[in-house]
Structure formats: C-alpha cells, structure tokens
Image (spheres, rainbow, N blue to C red):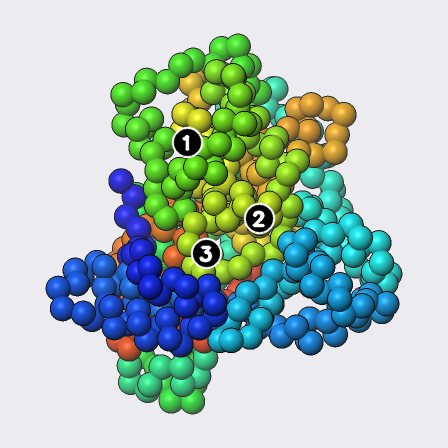
Amino acid sequence: MMISSHAVAAVPPHIQPLIEAGEFDKAQEQLRAAATAPGVAEADARGLLYEAERLDRIRKDFTITEPELYAQIREQIPDLAPEEIRVWREAGWLEGRMVDGRRRYFKNTVRNLFRLSAEARARRLPQAEPTPGAKPSGDREVSMEERMATYLAERRTADSVHVAPRRFLINYALTVDADAVPAGETVRCWLPFPREVPSQQDIALVSSDPAGAFIAPNDALQRSAYLERTAVAGQPTRFEIAFTLTTRARVEIVDPAIVQPYDTASELYRTYTAEEPPHLEFTPRLRALAREIVGDETNPYLKARRIYGYIDGNIRYTSALEYSTIPNISEYCAENGRGDCGIQGLLFIALCRISGVPAKWQSGWSLLPERTTMHDWTEFYVEPYGWLPADPSRGCRPSDDELVRWFNFGNMDPYRLVVNDAYGTEFVPPKKHFRSETVDFQRGEVEWAGGNLYFDQWDWDIEVLQHQEDAPATAKE
C-alpha cells in the first residue's frame, strides 16, 4: 500500500462550519485544542494539526479582495460593470471563498476567467500573447502533432516500444531565503531526482553542492536527492545537483481486439483499482460519473478511452490551487469541471479504478525544447500491453490522423523527466514535518528543526544544460 505523506483527519463537525464561514482564526484555535486534548491518538493529532496548517496555506492562495479583482479585470475589460463580478462568480468563473471574514479570490482567478469564459474572452482587449486555451500546447516551433507523427513512424520500423532517445544534462537548484532559518541550524533539503523506468535510463549524478548528496533508492516512488547545509546569518542557503539521463518516447499501437481480461486476484489489480485516500476516494459523485461515462463497455482499454475522452471534452485547463489545500482532488475536479494537469490526472485515475481499470500517477517535468515546466500525467494497465501512458491535460490533438489525435492516450513523447510513480509517498530519508506539497514532488522540500519551510520561503530553478537528440543507447559521461 502507498504511504501517505501527511496524516489525514476528519474535521470535527463543530469546526467545519467555522471553516466554511471563513472564520479561520477560531477554526485553527479549536483544531489545535482538539489535537492536544487528552486521549487523542498521535495520528489523529497530526491530522488535526495539518488541518490547521491547511488554513494558513489557503490564506496564501486566496489573496485578492473583490475591489482588487474588479480593478484587475477592468484592465482587460474596460466596460466591466461591478454587478458582473457576482454574476461571474455564481457562474463558477471566479474562484473565491470567505477568508478571515472577507471574501477573497484565488490569486490566479483573472487568468482562469479567460480560460473558462468565452464571454470574457470576447470582450477582452487585444493581447500581446495568445489567450490561454483549455489545453497547454508546445507548438511554437515544431508542432506537437508533427512530433507525434514522427514518433509513430519510428515505432513502425523499431523492435521496441521505446523510440526517439534524447540525452539530457539537467541542473536543479533550491535557494532558501536569507534568515528564514536561524544561523547555525541545519537545513534539510530534498531535491527531485529521476527514477529508472523503461522510458528513462542511464541516470547518473554528476555533482552536488554541498557534496555528498544521498540518492534515494530507485524503489522510492517519489525519488529524491537529500542534502544538508548549515544556515549562515544574512545569507541564502543554496542546494544544487546536476545529473544526466536518457529518455525515450513510449509508443504503442494498441489493437483493442486483443486486450485480455484481468487477473482480478493479482496484487497489481488489487493495488491499482483500490481507493487511496485522500484524493482517490470513490465518492457517490465519482461512482455515478464513471457509470455514466463507461456505460455498458467491457473492454478495459475502451473503458479508459471513454474516460479520457470525457475529460478532454468536459474538463477545462486552469491554473490550480496548491494541491495541499484541496481535501479530495479528484472530487474537486469532477465538481468544478476544471483543473491543471495533476488535478485532471487524479480524476482520470479515480474514474479508471472505479471502472475496474488499474491506473496510477506519474509526474516530474516536461522538457520540451520550447518550454521546460512541471508536469503530471498517468498510466493505466491493460493486458497484454502492460502500463500505458495517458496525459489527460494535453488531451486529443487537432489532427485528421486518428493515431495522432489520440496520441496522448496510450503514448508519451520523449521529453519527460520522471520523478514520481505515485502521489504523496514518504521520502528516503523521511521528512519530519509537514510537506509543502503533500501530493506531488517537483519543486523540492525543505525543513529545519523548527518546522517545514513553505514555498514562500524559498525559490527553485531547473536548467537544461545539454540536450542531445538521437542519443546512443548508453552515453559516456
């Protein structure tokens, strides 16, 4: 079973109304009192303390007042009327909530408005950059569709499903703000490090600063490089690693007619069709949605394809809240009809598992030449093909070629840096305090004896130092 990276506890019924009303100070006071009450189990206490911590994180996500929101939108829609804020909020286009007695809006609300509302887009002043669409796209030089056609052509003449090798040299750095930790204290840092998987091999650590990075074993499903450094007064605390790896596209032309039934007694099937709280719970909403999508289909591959098609057609891509602030991400996605790559991915996994199709998380970085960015996707399992990639947020492509159109369902480009093969698992060595990101692991994690260091106390940077196409199977360092 997966090990959760943070304790989960139900918020006591008398405290939940305080949270919903935005009375965060009172809620935090009562959560902390409940955590320290006599007889409370250690795991429950930790979960209650995490719920108190979550409210601080929500404050950091919801920072825009209604007057500020109105002013920001008017910069792009000059004829905006004040009443429209309420109308658009009720339509679900403006994500807000009560925080400390005032209505606050998500810090990326304006960006998301133009992704969600055709009306808002139509009234927007001309932009220097294209309006953000429902699906991220990497088609500024060579289009994704052209790349996909190339990978498919290469697969037809190859003996392996892994084609189009790429060799990378990557530098990753994390810098803690000066005086975020008292001088003389030890800062503990976990940086993302690639896992050895069929599509990604020949991995080597080139250097680390400080020297002596501990690399977690490859069976750590969220793999890291661990470093320690002593904080110095008035100076930032920096951690840095460089590593090389070879990645490959995973391309499989699936024939649904030869897909076989599962061995439902196998460990793989039981593990990857099970609920996995808190973000893969089979709620009544998700069960009903899965039945509606899958219908009477019995072929596992075609079940997953129907689910993928539903997400492509119904879930809009938006900038996301911090995952650690969302109690159940797959339920949130189904309820709100929006989310980024990881949010859409967890909905896909949940619906597949409910429908009896094994599915799991995978994530790390997209290393496309025109843009390096954090990215999440999924894998689902069918016999006799094994684990197949599925990237819901990149969706179906605009192509008359069906194999290109559905490329992101069952195939994957070679520009992937795989760090995680599960969500929210424990690090090696383990973290003592709450994680900043309780689900994913792409930016890094930092703590000291006094507690976790949240994202607003440090910065990160990833740099592709070298990219070699048509890399040899094994490259010399």
- Say whether disc 3 or disc 1 marks the residue closer to the N-terminus: 3
The front one of 35 and 346 is: 35
Coordinates of residue 71 in the picture (x, y in percent): 74, 74
Cα distance in 3D space between marks 3 and 1:
20 Å
Quadrant (top left, top right, bottom left, bottom right) of the N terminus: top left
Density class for disc 2 (Cα within 10 Å; few <14, some 14-19, many ≥20) is few
Residue 336: give its label.
2
Q: How many marks?
A: 3
**Residue 65 on image: x %, y %:** 62, 74
Picture residue at 86% right of the left edge, 61% below the top: 126
**On the rendered structure, is 118 left or right of 418?**
right
Report if the CB atoms under discs 2 and 3 are less than 8 Å apart. Answer: no
Q: Secondary structure at mark 1?
A: helix
Q: Amino acid at mark 3?
A: Ile
Circle 1 is placed at which residue position? 353
Residue 11: x and y in percent read 33, 59
The structure residue drawn at horizontal position 46% and vertical position 56%, both measured from the top left corner, is 326
Is residue 197 found left or right of 163 in the rendered image?
left
Q: Earlier in the sequence, mark 2 or mark 3?
A: 3
Residue 420 visible: yes
Label 2: state its secondary structure: helix
Return the residue nearer the eye: 117 or 270: 117
Asked whether, in this view, residue 335 is left or right of residue 440, the answer is right
**Residue at the spot 26% in from the left edge and 75% down from the top edge:** 449
Residue depth check, mark 2 versus mark 3: number of the one nearer the observer: 2
Q: Is residue 130 above or below residue 448?
A: above
What kind of residue is marked 2? Answer: Asn
Three-letter code for the amino acid on which mark 1 is drawn: Arg
Find residue 237 and report its image quarter: bottom left
Q: Would you place residue 44 above or below residue 67 in this image?
A: above
Q: Earlier in the sequence, mark 1 or mark 2?
A: 2
